[in-house]
Amino acid sequence: MIAGFYQFAPTRGRPEENAARMEQALRSAGTDLLVCPELATTGYLYTNREELADVAEAVPSGPTCARLGRAARESDSAIVFGIAERAGDGIYNSAVLLAPDGAAVCYRKAHLFDTETLVFDRSGESPRLGTIAGARIGLMICFDWRFPEMARLLALEGADLIAHPSNLVHPYCQDAMITRSLENRVYSITSSRTGSERLGGLEITFAGRSQIVSPRGERLAQADSSEECVRTVEIDPALARDKRVTARNDLFDDRRVDLYGPLTATGVRKRA
């Protein structure tokens, strides 16, 4: 399976323009799976919900999904991209997986970051797994990486590869995703964005440095902080399905779930 990322700087408020760039990347990449950044259709920085609603789209019936779904079918290649999803009265920070056979998975970001809380609705549980070229693809979005439970859930549900659309601003995620891949023995593709956005007195510069990591914690590909590029690698899903650490240890069979009760409790925070 050939998988990769497309790192670029989406233009704020221009969904059609951004979709055209992703379509071109998808058609030329030669991948089974291409992962694009978070909110790749709209750009990132919004503090006015009405302005965001003007560029939000329905999934999968909206124009971006129609365009990229057609490109996926014609190029026999799947794509994951971030979108501002409009559903009824709700607006969600979502990631969409579009497969060549027409299947669509839409995951709504579980952990909203900073100004996202001003304009996006908090989601409930949403679909997060699809199958591409025989590999199980799990979805999470940007700040979800700060919560190791998210990657572990995807791995326990059978993900071979975590597709991770992001708009990274802090410098820690790329190293942390090595740990997420290693502790779950899965591939991960973090597709971040470049450039900066300004809105009123707010300005955000994005970290770029998109990467692909193996189940052994190896960086297989990485971009720098500013380049627009596609990077691809060949992955072997069988490597992600072997959870053995030694001849006597299996990463999942050795879990002590009898000791993990507080992980599922709310409001539990021990203090000295």
Image (tube, helix red, strand yellow):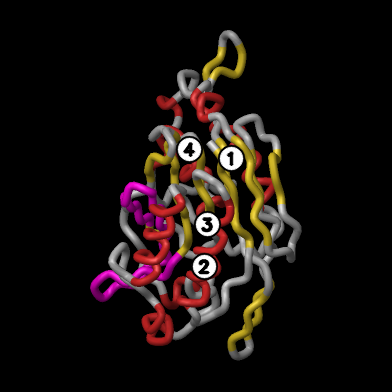
Element type where label 2 sits in the image: loop
Q: Earlier in the sequence, mark 2 or mark 4?
A: 2
Mark 1 and mark 2 residues within 8 Å of each other at the beta carbon:
no
Q: Amino acid at mark 2?
A: Ala
Q: Which residues are magenta?
A: 83-107
Disc 3 from disc 2: Cα separation:
14 Å
- Distance between the alpha carbons at the discs numbered 2 and 4: 25 Å
Residue 180: numbered disc: 1
* Labels 4 and 3: the sequence-earlier one: 3
Which circle marks residue 40 in the picture? 2
Instruction: Say the numbered circle drawn on residue 75.
Output: none
Residue at 41 percent across and 52 percent down: it is: 267
Mark 4 and mark 1: Cα distance apart in space: 8 Å
The quarter holding residue 257 reads: top left
Label 3 vs 2, first from the N-terminus? 3
How far apart marks 4 and 3 lie (CA) works out to 29 Å
Give the structural element (helix, strand or loop) at label 1.
Answer: helix
* Residue 16 location (% of width, % of height): 46, 77
Residue 129 on image: x %, y %: 38, 43
Instruction: Please state which of residues 214 and 254 is positioned toward the viewer in this rendering.
Output: 214
In the rendered image, residue 148, in percent from the top left (x then y), is placed at: 53, 43
